Image (tube, rainbow, N blue to C red):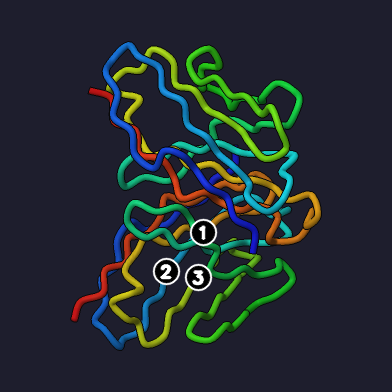
Amino acid sequence: GAVVSQHPSRVICKSGTSVKIECRSLDFQATTMFWYRQFPKQSLMLMATSNEGSKATYEQGVEKDKFLINHASLTLSTLTVTSAHPEDSSFYICSARDPARQGSIYEQYFGPGTRLTVT
Amino acid sequence: GEDVEQSLFLSVREGDSSVINCTYTDSSSTYLYWYKQEPGAGLQLLTYIFSNMDMKQDQRLTVLLNKKDKHLSLRIADTQTGDSAIYFCAEERQLTFGSGTQLTVLP
């Protein structure tokens, strides 16, 4: 099956700094990637949909200036958490859509997640 | 918006069956999914069911769908300690996830 990787798997940063999380589709080209956030013992919350070569579409309540998403190539999307605060600490998961499998139940592949801790 | 609900916790003894329940609101979903998330890991697609099916069996997993009541369930037969994880149901289009059910398997 298709593989999606995330880097780093864990990151600790100080308040006020920015941190970048990468999401890569390793063996397919992903025209669309999704970024989710998961709080401890809670469900995934879709933050934004990232389309290659265009601006990301953010869900209601998600600050686009705080969570910068760049989908510069068909295999890479990045999420940058700017001016991080402790409340941004969370598990961030990306998923990627394989257009070759559009419409099938396998159209989204999930990355392993990135644990962000802001001190 | 669309809503998917699950009970938060379930404990079973090893070897017993587990039944995880889910209710959803979007009747237009063509597929409904069950995902498994182990601690600190991403989501793994376990199984899915077409909306025009009532039941689907896949080895130890049985999915039941009641479209009238918008109720979905996942039954795990002969539950093992390796099945301990969080299980999410999800609707198709918005990929809206339930809150997740923490399954704990006791020896």
First in sequence, mark 1 or 3: give its number: 3
How packed mark 1 is, by other alpha carbons closer than 10 Å (few <14, some 14-19, many 20 or more), is many
B87 displayed left or right of B96: left
Q: Name the residue under label 1.
A: B89
Respond whether the residues carrying marks 2 and 1 are from the same subunit. Answer: yes
In the image, residue B32 lies at what x, y percent? 63, 61
Report if the CB atoms under discs 2 and 1 are less than 8 Å apart: yes
A61 displayed left or right of A9: right
Task: Give me the chain letter of mark 3.
Answer: B
What residue occupies the far left of the structure in this picture? B107
What residue occupies the far front of the structure in this picture? A26
Q: In which quarter of the image is the N terminus of chain B?
A: top right
Q: Is mark 2 on a helix, strand or loop?
A: strand
Residue type, mark 1 in image: Cys
Instruction: Say which of marks 1 and 3 sits in front.
Output: 1
In the image, residue B21 lies at what x, y percent? 45, 66
How packed mark 3 is, by other alpha carbons closer than 10 Å (few <14, some 14-19, many 20 or more), is some
Q: Is mark 1 on a helix, strand or loop?
A: strand
A1 displayed left or right of A63: right
Task: Give me the chain letter of mark 2.
Answer: B
Q: Residue at x 63, y 36 (%)?
A: A76
Q: Mark 3 points at which residue?
A: B73
Q: Residue at x 20, y 76 (%)?
A: B106
Residue type, mark 3 in image: Ser
Q: What element carries label 3?
A: strand
